[in-house]
Amino acid sequence: GHFCGGTLISPEWVLTAKHCLEKSSSPSSYKVILGAHEEYHLGEGVQEIDVSKLFKEPSEADIALLKLSSPAIITDKVIPACLPTPNYVVADRTACYITGWGETKGTYGAGLLKEARLPVIENKVCNRYEYLGGKVSPNELCAGHLAGGIDSCQGDSGGPLVCFEKDKYILQGVTSWGLGCALPNKPGVYVRVSRFVTWIEEIMRRN
Ligand code: ARG
């Protein structure tokens, strides 16, 4: 069954969270579902592809790459996301979007893919004592509503945080962790993809 999200970044590669791969180090334990909207009814245009290799980021970052056993067919429902330029810093208050089949107050989104709009909160603000109190590293970014109520949650990990920039959506974050879900003053934390673009491109080029 579904337990994490991911983002297609080229026909053969999916970016996800490293903690999503804790259950097994064998690629054959995982399968990627592309182009689905309903979790329990994979409709038309859905592609199910096996994973041939796992690549975990070698430092402590919660990010990993999956190589697919065959390339995804690019369609109107299965389209890779763009990567940011290396070390790009998303500005405070930029509107971004998260998606997933994760937890929504005990119903796991009723099996339908959910989307939410969240503003980015710059690290300096997010690390204030009353928010995440210094727990957020420069390799991560915060996004959320300080009032609470809208957030990613269990099961959304590994999935995308995309931000519209000029004329397209760019994958700026990978859903990683939070203190509870949707609590006031506790925004969600996302791996800052721009810090890992060089690693991502290197792995893709060599494999
Ligand atoms: N760690 C969670 C997962 O494995 C994602 C948590 C995100 N939490 C949050 N409050 N934004 O699915």
Image: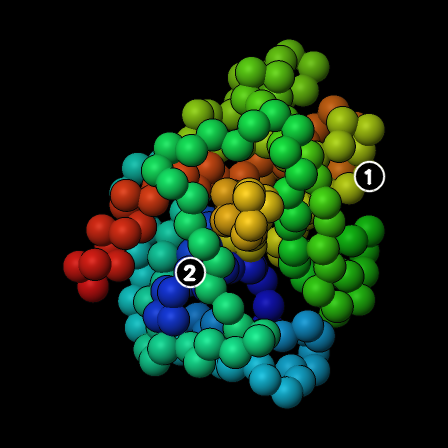
Dot 2: what SS? strand
What residue is at 61 percent from the left and 21 percent from the top?
Answer: 126
| Residue 41 % position (x, y) | 70, 82
Q: Classify mark 1 as within 8 Å of ligand 1 or not, answering yes or no.
A: no
Q: Which residue is identified by label 1?
A: 149
- Left-right relation of 103 to 83: right
Q: Which residue is identified by label 2?
A: 9
| Residue 89 % position (x, y) | 47, 30
| Residue 78 % position (x, y) | 53, 73
Q: Which mark is residue 169?
A: none
Tag 2: amino acid: Ile
- Left-right relation of 147 to 151: right
What residue is at 70 percent from the left and 14 percent from the top?
Answer: 130
What residue is at 82 percent from the left and 39 percent from the top?
Answer: 149
Tag 1: amino acid: Gly
Camera-side residue of 96 and 29: 96
- Left-right relation of 47 to 118: left
- Left-right relation of 97 to 167: right
Q: Is residue 176 above or below residue 206?
A: above
What residue is at 31 percent from the left and 73 percent from the top?
Answer: 52
Classed neighbour count for the residue bearing mark 1: other residues with Cα under 10 Å, few (<14), some (14–19), many (≥20) = few
Q: Do the residues bearing badges 1 and 2 touch, measured as CB atoms within 8 Å?
A: no
Front disc: 1 or 2: 2
Q: Classify mark 2 as within 8 Å of ligand 1 or not, answering yes or no.
A: no
